[in-house]
Image (cartoon, rainbow, N blue to C red):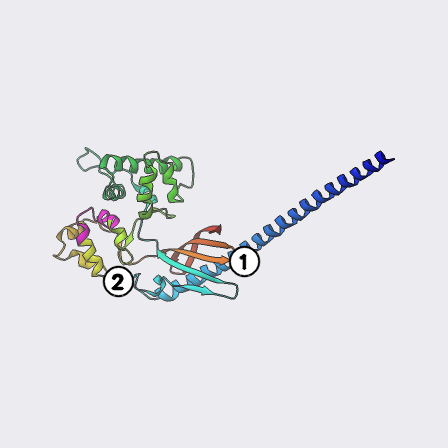
Amino acid sequence: MNKQRGMALLMVLLMMSVMTIIAVNINSYWQRSLTRAQFQQDQLRAKWLLLGGEIYAKRQLQQALDKQVSVSLGQAWAREDMAMRTEEGEVSVRIVSADVCFNLNALAASSPVDDAGGEKPKIAREKRIFMLLLTNLGVDEPQAGAIADAVIMKISAQRGTSETGYLIEDVSELREIGVINPELYLRIAPLVCALPDNTLQINLNTATERQLPLIRAMLLNALGNEQLLAIIAGRPQLGWNSLDFLTTDNYPELRKLKDGGLADGLVTTGNRFTVELRVKLDDGRYRLVSALQRNSTGTKVIRRQFGWGEH
């Protein structure tokens, strides 16, 4: 009798243990489901807030650049404290010019140009500028040529397998090139970009000291850093309307370059911008980077990249 009672008690305890385990698992499941649902809800809220911030940024560009001849850092769109405030939260907005970096896709046009004498082919302008940019960053000339050839080969190889052509979509694709090590990539990345076309133009009105190696390269290293710093320091608050001053007797080297068409990539305006939007909801931080293109009909989004749950 006592043995039967002991077995019954053991069975009861076993069933209670199983029920407890089931209850804990169910509770854990619902907690995970609730957390997941909350995260998805925050993602959706953040998405619409960030897209609203994108519209806000487009409006700011439209208002600041309407009927303006030039695009410069002295205009309202370039403010660093811009934000869109709503009942749902505050979205920080940062607009930067996308015309202050070397467009890697410009190398797609770097097919060799035959010399008039029929001898050694000339290095294409875009490739020459890219190589000078690399040497200005401390890369020796043979390695700079190898890197440029590797990028051109990457674009050409992909173009050969695509009827619509190929363009590099992100600067991070440089990591795939064996001649670029991580340390060199970190030096190159801030001064290059991957825009959805093969044009190369640098807006001197939105360039800063950080772009000195690139500006020097655009001018085929005709001027030194001190001369370029003086030019940037003397820039009007609202920027230059033209770069005619580069042809004065103060800079005879630049006059020669411009007359030869080698400085055509320097401009005082620009139609491409990058907008970085951030918002914080509960314990999560969310980010959207949008590439904008202005034209005669307005401003359109050509690329978006969301970042969820960033801390």
- The local secondary structure at tag 1 comes to helix
Q: What residue do we see at 64% from left, 47% from top? A: 28
Outermost residue to the front: 2
Q: What residue is disc 1 on? A: 45
Query: Between residues 57 and 30, which one lies in front from this camera angle?
Result: 30
Across and down, in percent, residue 187 comes to 30, 44
User: 280 left or right of 68?
Assistant: right
- Asked whether 269 falls inside the magenta stretch, the response is no
Separation of residues labelled 1 and 2 (CA atoms): 39 Å
Q: Is residue 227 above or below residue 76?
A: above
Q: Which residues are magenta?
A: 213-226
1 or 2: tag closer to the N-terminus: 1
Across and down, in percent, residue 286 comes to 48, 54
Identified by mark 1, the residue type is Arg
Q: What residue is disc 2 on? A: 239
Q: What residue do we see at 21% from left, 60% from top? A: 233
Q: What residue do we see at 31% from left, 50% from top? A: 101
Identified by mark 2, the residue type is Gly
Outermost residue to the right: 1
User: 127 left or right of 66?
Assistant: left
Across and down, in percent, residue 206 comes to 29, 57
Question: Which of labels 1 and 2 is toward the front?
Answer: 1
| The N terminus, quarter of image | top right
Across and down, in percent, residue 178 comes to 35, 33
Any mark on residue 19, and which?
Answer: none
Q: Is residue 172 above or below residue 264?
A: above
- Say if residue 224 shows up in the picture: yes
- The local secondary structure at tag 2 comes to loop
- Asked whether 222 falls inside the magenta stretch, the response is yes
Q: What residue do we see at 36% from left, 63% from top? A: 77
